[in-house]
Amino acid sequence: MNTVSPTTDVKDFLSQEPIPHFINGGFAPGGAKPQAVMNPATGQPIAQVAMARAEDVATAVEAAHAAFPTWAALSPSERAVRLHRLAEAVEANLETLAQLEALDVGKAIEAARGFDVPFGAECLRYFADISVRAVYDRPLAVKNIEARVHRAPYGVCGFIFPWNFPFTLLCWGIGPALAAGNTVVVKASEVTPLSSLYFGKLAEAAGIPRGVINILTGTGPEAGQPLAEHPLVKRMSFTGSTPVGKLIGRICGERLAPCKLELGGKGAAVVFDDVDVDAAAEGLAGAITLNTGQVCCTATRWFLHEKIYDRFVDKVAQVLKSTRIGPGLSPETAMGPLVSQAQLDRVLGYYEKGLAEGATPVVTCERPAVPGAEGGYFVSPHLLTGSDDNVCFREEVFGPTAYLVKFKDEDDAAARVNRLAYGLANSVWTSDLTRAQSFAEKIVAGNSWINAHNVFAYGLPYGGVNLSGTGGGVNSPETFDDYLRNQTIARPL
Ligand code: NAD
């Protein structure tokens, strides 16, 4: 398969040994031993990256703390102008960022060009614009007291991100925090840190004052935990797995720092017998091949009405088997490799466990040979069916796979969807839009989508409940409000 040639900027960036952190407006080495970042399409190293320890995290937090008063004192419009400049820098470097994302995560370059990078830039603009229109002081009509509620930024906000959508999640996280006047320290995933570290260069070029944005990487225990524990971090945001989210929640609870948790999921799609079967099959095939199924909210349990089960399976098998699998850097690729050897082991391990617990393959799991990309972490999209007690029905696999079950009765389907403690996103597929609306309410999650799965837009709140998260979610005006603290100012008359 043809692959795009890396831009000069990509080559220069990757040739640094190691790629440094971005702290206090400059590029800093980390205290821990640099680590190789792997190309998931080949299993070979792409670059060496500096790794942070607690001391580096402390330096970054102190820089963000020192930068806070000046950044917070700018008017919302002055900050918004800088965030728009930053968005422009992202757009001007779209190809470089998309290539880094495709190389590092393994995602299809066309998806990185068309979604991950531009949608990140749009986020910076969205929250910049909200900040200009926001009300920061609200007078209170209270008997015998002159009073108002004043809204102010918290100070330093800490962010820990996972490896699956590094660039988009970075922007979703820090966009609202910066627009509200906070400064930020980011711990990017050590598995896919490249686009986040490159973003530091853009922040510098866009004239973001030094110390306002700090980006480092390192392991969770060595760099993530010290960030969550640091007393100068006044607000935390964690996106990642539920077990680590619980740990971050405990750390923040101990020191009473507000914390946003965006965690794992086990989304369901419920397909009624009145759907356009071909369109629904194509939609759900797309949901599990998007980002090689490494999508927290995607549809991984498919409830198919018994009347259309066979037709649906025939169509979806045909679509999945024709998926073009290849390296992320190839424009012909529809689905890239899994992100790492560990993720490959996990996905294959779940397939084996599922079979051992009695599941039947509907579309088998293969290791496709990809010419020119030997050694890559490739796996074919696959489907299992069986009982609701199977491990692949109950647990998050995080790969290009779904577990199929039949249903006949609507209430029974809703009860089975709601049986798990995850609550991130589900979808309902039917041509009866009245039924769609009422069923969407019955399935408990932060998001219910109708005749589509994975629906994102700014202004559409996105977040989880139960084991999928807490703390308000992202992408809406309320996300901006989350990054302002309320202060009541009152004078008895
Ligand atoms: P992970 O929880 O293993 O790691 C996430 C981040 O936490 C990484 O930066 C990691 O270094 C850090 N970390 C790990 N251990 C830590 C510790 N002890 N202390 C502090 N930080 C620590 O998750 P992952 O494997 O990178 O990502 C996959 C998970 O993320 C999936 O469960 C997926 O559903 C979830 N996810 C959720 C959303 C959402 O919006 N709800 C979005 C993307 C991914």
Image (cartoon, helix red, strand yellow):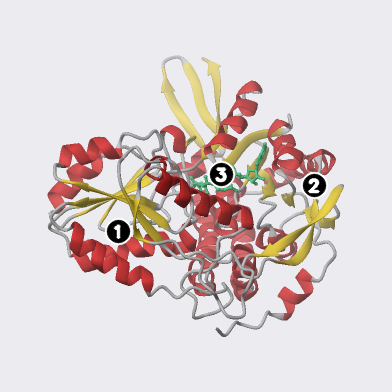
Q: Quadrant of residue 196?
A: bottom right
Q: Are marks 1 and 3 in contact (CB under 8 Å)?
A: no
Q: Report, in whole angstroms, how far the alpha carbon at label 2 lies from the one at label 1.
A: 40 Å
**Does residue 487 appear left or right of residue 324 in this picture?**
right
Instruction: Estimate the x, y position of residue 429 in percent, counting from the top left.
Output: 22, 55
Determine the image quadrant of residue 229: top right
Is residue 242 shown left or right of residue 26?
Answer: left
Mark 2 near ligand 1 (CB under 8 Å)?
no
Residue that extends furthest to the bottom in the rendered view of this protein: 2
User: Which residue is under mark 2?
Assistant: 52
SS for dot 2? loop
Point 48% across, 73% down: residue? 325
**Is residue 5 shown above or below 433?**
below
**Sequence-first tag of 2 and 3:** 2
Label located before the other in sequence (1 or 3): 3
Residue 81 placement, left or right of 22: left
Residue hosting label 1: 452
Q: Nearer the viewer, residue 91 or 111?
A: 111
Q: Is mark 3 within 8 Å of ligand 1?
A: yes
Which mark, by number, is residue 240?
3
Q: Residue at x 30, y 42 (%)?
A: 387
Q: CA distance from mark 1 to mark 3?
A: 24 Å
Q: Quadrant of the N terminus?
A: bottom right
